[in-house]
Amino acid sequence: MQLRFMQMEYLYGQAMRFRVEDILNKPIALLPAILRELDRLPTKI
């Protein structure tokens, strides 16, 4: 679970490296799934 959390944290970081304007104009498809997983994982660790 910790490894999965680290993977999701990395993917979130990659998704957020763009400018806010770019993210708002072209949303990242996996971002909602990444955020859900990041929200769920700490309770499982």
Image: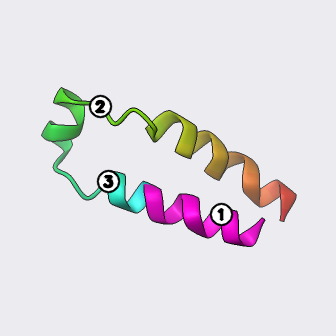
2 within the magenta span = yes
Question: Measured from the top left, where is residue 45 in percent x and y?
Answer: 83, 65
17 within the magenta span = no
Q: Amino acid at mark 1?
A: Phe
SS for callout 1: helix
Q: CA distance from mark 1 to mark 2?
A: 22 Å
Q: Amino acid at mark 3?
A: Met
Is residue 32 toward the left or the right of residue 43 in the image? left
User: What residue is pinned by disc 3?
Assistant: 16
* Magenta region, residue range: 1-11
Quarter placement of the N terminus: bottom right
Q: Amino acid at mark 2?
A: Pro
SS for callout 3: loop
Q: CA distance from mark 3 to mark 1?
A: 16 Å
Is residue 12 toward the left or the right of residue 34 in the image? left
Question: Measured from the top left, where is residue 33 in percent x and y?
Answer: 56, 37
CA neighbours of label 1 inside 10 A, class few (<14), some (14 to 19), many (20+): some
SS for callout 2: loop
Question: Measured from the top left, where is residue 44 in percent x and y?
Answer: 85, 57
CB under 8 Å between discs 3 and 1: no
User: What residue is pinned by disc 1?
Assistant: 5
Circle on res. 27:
2
Residue drawn 65% across the image and 63% down it:
5
Residue drawn 34% across the image and 36% down it:
28
